Image: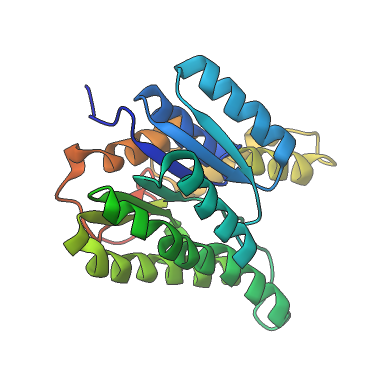
Amino acid sequence: MDLGLRDKVAVITGGSVGIGLAVAEGLAAEGVHLILAARGGERLAAETSRLAGQFGVRAVPCACDVATPDGTASLAAMAEAEFGGADILINNAGTGSNETIMEAPDEKWQAYWDLHVMAAVRLARGLVPGMRRRGGGVILHNASICATQPLWYEPIYNVTKAALMMFSKTLANELVKDNIRVNTVNPGLILTPDWIKTAKQLTADKGGDWQGYLDGVAREHAPIDRFASPEELANFFVFLCSDRASYSVGSTYFVDGGMLNTV
C-alpha cells in the first residue's frame, strides 16, 4: 500500500536505536527523508548513513540532548536549515525509571519532566511554524501504557508519561485548525535493547536465562504472551503519519497485546 509519504520530512527523537530507529526505517521505506536526534553521535552517524544508503533517502544526524532547551533549539534549526522545516515530528526520546516517591529527589523528577514533557513542548514550538508554512503535518508522541496503567516501581515514568499524553491531547485541539494532526501511542511490552539489557543483568547470577525472564514478563502482563518487536509498533506509527489516518486527531492508541486491563 502506498501511504503517500514520499519526500516528506520526519524528525525523530531517540532515533538511533530501538523504537525510534524502527520508526525511522519504516518511514524511510516509504521514501521519507529523516532527521534523527540522539545523544550518541557515533551510533547516530552510522545509522543515518545506513538508512540513506539502504532506502535512497536523505538522512541527517543531529547529536543533541532534547531534554535541554539548547538541544531542542539545535534540532529545530537543523530541520529548517536542511529541509526548510519538517512535515512529521515523532517525540520518542525517553527512558524508564526505578524509584519510590518517598525517596526520589527533586532533581530526578525534573530530569524526567524535561525529557518526557518539555522536549515535546519545545519541539512543538520550534517545528510547528514550519509545518504551518508547509500546509500541515503530523506530530506523534510515544508515551506508554504506564500513562494509564502504572507500574509500582517507576512512579516518575508513570507521571511524566501521563502528562505527555495530556499535552498531546491539548496540542491536538490547538493545532487541528492548521491541518496538523497530533496523536499519542501507548505501547505495551516492546522488545527494545533496554529490555534485553535489563533482563541479562537480572539473570546474570541465576543462570543467565534472560529469554526465559522476558517470557515470564510477557506471560504475566500481556494476554498475547509475548513482546512486540519494535518493527510491529513502528508499522502503527507509520500508518498514523499517513493520510490514511486523516480523521485521527487528538487520540491515544494502545498497542499492547491486550495488556490494558480496562475498556
Q: Quadrant of the N terminus?
A: top left
Residue sitting farthest toward the right = 205
Q: Quick check: 19 above or below 183?
A: above
**In this view of the protein, which residue sits in the foreground, 218 or 14?**
14
Q: Position of residue 18 (x, y in %)?
A: 57, 38
Whether residue 262 is visible: yes
Q: Quick check: 249 above or below 200?
A: below
137 vs 45, left or right, is left
Q: Position of residue 171 (x, y in %)?
A: 31, 67
Q: Residue at x 36, y 71 (%)?
A: 166
Instruction: Give residue 42's quadrant in the image.
Output: top right
Q: Residue at x 34, y 45 (%)?
A: 87
Instruction: Give residue 231's quadrant in the image.
Output: top left
Instruction: Give residue 84's quadrant in the image.
Output: top left
Q: Quadrant of the C terminus?
A: bottom left
Whether residue 190 is visible: no
Q: Position of residue 29 (x, y in %)?
A: 39, 22
Q: Quick check: 141 above or below 17?
A: below
Q: Quick check: 249 above or below 36?
A: below
**In this view of the protein, which residue sits in the foreground, 247 or 87?**
87
Q: Position of residue 206 (x, y in %)?
A: 81, 40
Q: Residue at x 38, y 70 (%)?
A: 167
195 vs 22, left or right, is right
Q: Residue at x 45, y 61 (%)?
A: 126
How was the colour assigned to the protein in this rendering? Answer: rainbow
